[in-house]
Amino acid sequence: MAPHFSPFSSSLLILLLGFIFHIVDGTDQILSARLHVDLKTLQPKDSCSPSVKGAGVSSGTNWTSLRVVHRHGPCSPFAGQQKQLSHAKILDLDQARVDDIHRRVSDSKPLAASDSAATLPARSGAYIGSGNYVVTVGFGTPKNDQIVIFDTGSSISWIQCQPCVSCYEQEAPLFDPSRSSTYANISCGSSFCDELGNATCSDSNCMYGVKYLDNSSTFGFYAQDTLTLSPVDSIPGFRFGCGERNMGLFHGNDGLLGLGPLKLSLVSQTYTQYGGVFSYCLPLTSSSVGYLAFGSYPDGDLLFTPMLSNASQPAFYYLELTGISVDGQLLSVPPSIFANTGTFIDSGTVITRLPATAYSALRSAFRQRMTAYKSAPEAELLDTCYDFSGSGGQVSIPTVALHLGGDVTINLTMAGILFTVKSSQTCLAFSSNGDDTRMGILGNTQQRGFNVLYDINKRVIGFGPGGCS
């Protein structure tokens, strides 16, 4: 039985909120009408506004769903306990994550086709950055709840553990393996240790290590224990890193839940249980709630684009970005600009990165249609910004559509086009990679409000409107 997600009328939600994405296939007309939206809908509220789908944890036969919240909003378990990051700081951390990803890709060596699904460097995760979206899961028996970032750009899962030689500050108590009746270290001779690629050993115990570009790191025992996703759904023998030496800018999160495509990820470890199927909706604002589900398709219409692979860097989920339209007009960008570098979808990157040629065309077309509004200074990596403070709270912007493989077109609304830095500074939520040689990234700003589905077996990625409603 799949979780019941009752779909709302897409047209009604657009009239009320101006948020939900219009999705058409490539044979339908691309939206050319401008978007008229109340600016208040871009601003988070001071209190949490849980949605129907994200109201709590639920489970059924061979499926489970978790509540997703923004790390820096009022729905977060950290709300009121720590100083929240500014939007400028979030953008700065986002650039650090992208720099780390690009460094990994440029340093990677091609793998043989037979090895691409099984071989993994020990450094198996992307830089966490601001850690935007978190879920709460339980480790051990009895379970110890941990607040972790979920990340499609990382495959290894890890949390901080006692006894801690060096740990950063977190809100929840550190996980203590000695108090769990089901915990066990993985031995160096185990085939599970081989998943790490080049793991080290300590007294016959398998040791993992992840080091990021900014010198943040986590190191400890590669271990097994029960992972509890809901009161009735747990995964015995879940493999994860039990970190005893952790340092860096992890911002109080207890660890990370890796949803990448490699063998040691949660998705791969639960393949027999959930069939390699998971989906999520990232909340529209930091004051609303989304979901992360395993084992079922969400209700409502989905359009599917092929899930591609990259043998030289198999740690990400790839798709084909073929073009971009502004106000219904396809930009004059050669398809080879997108094809030469490739594009992957990432839950952890905030701002979508495009090849320089594609971004230049998008920026030019967008600016030409925004001359009615006062320009604002650049904000970190965002160079096309506006001051809407004198607009009376209502703005009209050109539509932006992303064209994907499989003849799929996604027409974004304001939530996927603009990023509000502050009340007098709202920017185009895309950025350039600096040249045409670096891999493109479909970031989480453009994913907000979607049902985003990954089906490893069918090799497709699906998009559907009204995901968090």
Image (spheres, rainbow, N blue to C red):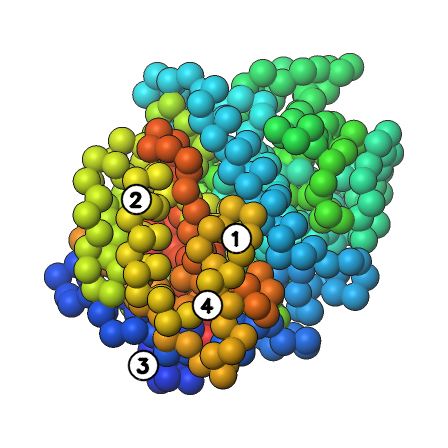
Q: What residue is pinned by disc 1?
A: 378
Q: What residue is pinned by disc 3?
A: 11
Kind of residue at disc 3: Ser
Whether residue 41 is visible to the viewer of this picture, yes or no, is no
SS at mark 2? helix
Kind of residue at disc 4: Lys
Q: Viewed as shown, does residue 331 lie left or right of 49?
A: left
Q: Position of residue 384 (x, y in %)?
A: 44, 55
Kind of residue at disc 2: Ala
Q: Nearer the viewer, mark 4 or mark 1?
A: 4
Q: What residue is pinned by disc 2?
A: 358
Nearest to N terminus: mark 4 or mark 2: 2
Taking 41 as reference, is 334 above or below it? above
Nearest to N terminus: mark 1 or mark 3: 3
What residue lies at 46% left-to-right and 75% top-to-bottom?
A: 469
Taking 221 as reference, is 144 above or below it? below
Q: Nearer the viewer, mark 3 or mark 2?
A: 2
What residue lies at 76% left-to-right and 39% top-to-bottom?
A: 160
Q: Between marks 3 and 2, how big is the CA–CA gap? A: 30 Å
Q: What residue is pinned by disc 4?
A: 374
SS at mark 1? loop
Q: Residue 136 lies in what quarter of the image?
A: bottom right
Q: Quadrant of the N terminus?
A: bottom left
Contact, mark 4 vs mark 2 (Cβ under 8 Å): no
Q: Between marks 1 and 3, how big is the CA–CA gap? A: 34 Å
Contact, mark 2 vs mark 1 (Cβ under 8 Å): no
Q: Residues within 10 Å of mark 1 (few under 14, many from 20)?
A: some
Contact, mark 3 vs mark 2 (Cβ under 8 Å): no
Nearest to N terminus: mark 2 or mark 1: 2
Q: Between marks 2 and 1, how big is the CA–CA gap? A: 19 Å
Q: Between marks 4 and 3, how big is the CA–CA gap? A: 30 Å
